[in-house]
Image: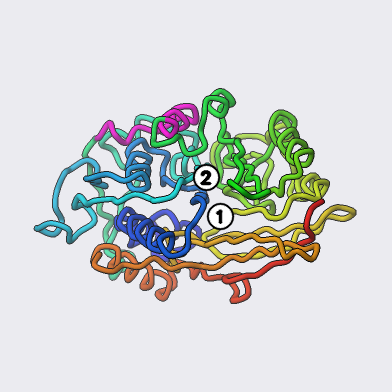
Amino acid sequence: IFDSPGPFASAFRPQEGHECRILNAAVRTINALHRSTPLDFVLLGGDNADSAQTNEISWFTSILDGAERVECDSGDDDDPVQGPDNDPKDPFFAEGLLVPWRWVTGNHDVLHQGNFPVDSRAELAVGNISEGGTRDWSLPGGPVITGEVVPDPRRALLTRPALLEQLAASGDGHGIGPETRAYGKAFYEFDVKDTPVRVIVLDTAAETGGANGVIVQDDVDRFIRPALDRAQREHRWVVLASHHASRLLGDGSFAGTGAPKVPGALSPEAWQAFVGGYDNVLLHLAGHTHVHRLTQVAPVGGHAYWELETSALADYPHQVRVIEIWDDDNGFVTIRGVALDYADDDDPVAAEGRRRAIVDFTSGFGDDGSGAPEWRNVELSIERPD
């Protein structure tokens, strides 16, 4: 129990219960944009669940696919504020995205609380015991409130194969086909229709635990290198997508469980040098930090490319990013990334979620994920691949 945010500020947010409605508002906003400016697809940033729970993934896919009734509740089926559509536990209608969406795995999707292997927490998730407690934050040092929680089998933790199976059964599979399921991790690729762009999706969540990303040589040899070689032969412009940016790649060790280094884990420098060997890579998209960030990766002796990290819907400023790529017909390609707020029109629960998030970061507990001004709305140039 802590009286200051410290390193555990992201373990719970005052807007946590409102996240389903925030996501639903973002879906409506993206649909409104699509009606005026057609979009090809929506690409996720990872951490689509909080603790790798079955019910969390079910809520998420229902909101993005569309459903007559979504109820983001667990355990005690109560109504904190009496009446319909006025608190986060009330059921709501989800219109679903009007464009295809594609999955990216984050550490919170496959690890309990984004850090712990699911096999070590299986009973805890569905049971009636809570590891911690809470207190009235207006009374620093006040009494800790503990107690039992209502058990719920729908909170069962998902293994990676079970997660992929649940996703594959949702809508069009969202990029998770038979080959990806057989591989066991969310590595896959797809082409953007009527363009030379190919998106290669990477699974950087560590099996061993911990929040950092990991890419191992085995995945490079089995999937990543063949995919990049194929894209180069076919004259495709590559956009890489993963939850973790390259600077956040680790060795797979995790002090929380005593897990040692993972054999073959690539350092950030080794990964960047590898990608720099492919002059058709334009961009690497990532999330994880909940902060907008732009980096030009320029490995020594290799091809320079851009890394673009986008903030999260979970925290302020609750933004997504609209990416446009076009050929300038002068030997260069332009990449535009515009940060987009969700509209909370006629959705008081989503609006309350935003209000709470603003209070969270202005009080000093949460961070402002806006990043530097030059990292928010960007227009980038890169040499056109042959």
Residue in the picture at 41% in, 42% down? 51
Relative to 21, is 109 on the left or the right?
right
Q: Residue furthest left?
A: 82
Amino acid, disc 1:
Gly
* Mark 2 secondary-structure assignment: loop
**How many badges with numbers are in the image?**
2
* In the depicted structure, whether residue 14 falls above or below residue 227: below
Picture coordinates of residue 288, whole percent (x, y): 54, 54
Picture coordinates of residue 353, whole percent (x, y): 31, 64
In which quadrant will I find the N terminus?
bottom left
Q: Is residue 155 magenta?
A: yes
* In the depicted structure, whether residue 297 falls above or below residue 362: above
Disc 1 marks which residue? 287
Please tell me which residue lies in front, 165 or 212. Answer: 165
Residue in the picture at 34% in, 49% down? 96
Amino acid, disc 2:
Gly
Please tell me which residue lies in front, 132 or 305. Answer: 305
Relative to 122, is 44 on the left or the right?
right
Q: Residues within 10 Å of mark 1 (few under 14, many from 20)?
A: many
Relative to 84, is 220 on the left or the right?
right
* Mark 1 secondary-structure assignment: loop
Picture coordinates of residue 374, whole percent (x, y): 63, 75
Asked if the residue at tag 2 contacts the one at tag 1, i.e. Cβ–Cβ closer than 8 Å, the answer is: yes
Residue in the picture at 64% in, 39% down? 253
Q: CA distance from mark 1 to mark 2?
A: 9 Å
Residue in the picture at 43% in, 35% down? 172
Disc 2 marks which residue? 106
Q: Which residues are magenta?
A: 152-168
Q: Residue furthest right?
A: 301
